[in-house]
Image: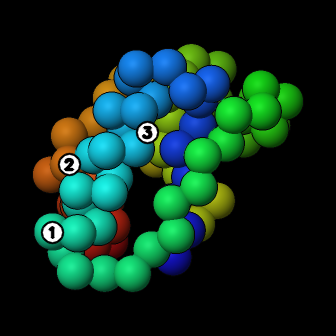
Amino acid sequence: MTIQVLGPGCHNCKSTEAAAREAVASLGITAEIVKVTDYAEIARMGVMKTPGLAIDGKVVISGRVPTAAEVAELLKK
């Protein structure tokens, strides 16, 4: 499983990455967490407002910081 954190590296992007890491740890699963900072790549994925979060290439959150619990629910699906 690959989790992509979409954003330039701002505070909200770092918070989104932390939530993803916390969710992965709480579920005890293995996942690669990748930061995508290239604006062209972020736009290509359809995200116009960061931060964003994608799971296996599918954008699941855009424009807000998720909680770790919310990310965990998305990862369970």
For this view, does 42 lie left or right of residue 7? right
Neighbourhood count class around disc 2 (C-alpha, 10 Å): few under 14, some 14–19, many 20 upward: many
The residue mark sitting in front, 3 or 1, is 1
The tag earlier along the polypeptide, 2 or 3, is 3
Residue 51 at x, y percent in the picture: 49, 28
The numbered mark, 3 or 1, whose residue comes first in the sequence reads 1
Quadrant in the rendering for residue 58:
bottom right
Tell me which residue sits at (22%, 80%) in the image: 28
The amino acid type of the residue labelled 3 equals Ile
Q: Which residue is mark 3?
A: 61
SS under mark 3 = strand
Label 1: few (<14), some (14–19) or many (≥20) C-alpha neighbours in 10 Å? few
Do the CB atoms of the residues marked 2 and 3 lie less than 8 Å apart?
Answer: no
Residue designated by label 1: 26
Q: CA distance from mark 2 to mark 3?
A: 13 Å
Mark 1 lies on a secondary structure that is helix
Q: Residue at x 34, y 53 (%)?
A: 20
Q: CA distance from mark 1 to mark 2?
A: 9 Å
Residue 30 location (% of width, % of height): 39, 81
Q: Quadrant of the C terminus?
A: bottom left
Label 2 SS: helix
Q: Amino acid at mark 1?
A: Ser
Identified at 64% across, 59% down, the residue is 57
Q: Looking at this view, is 44 or 33 the one in front?
A: 33
Whether residue 30 sits left or right of residue 51 in the image: it is left
Q: Is residue 16 visible?
A: yes
**Quarter of image, res 31:** bottom left
Residue closest to the eye, 22 or 45: 22
State yes or no: discs 1 and 2 in contact (Cβ < 8 Å). Answer: yes
Residue 58 visible at all: no
- Give the residue number, with chain letter if any, for mark 2: 68
Task: Mark 2 vs mark 3: give the one in front.
Answer: 2
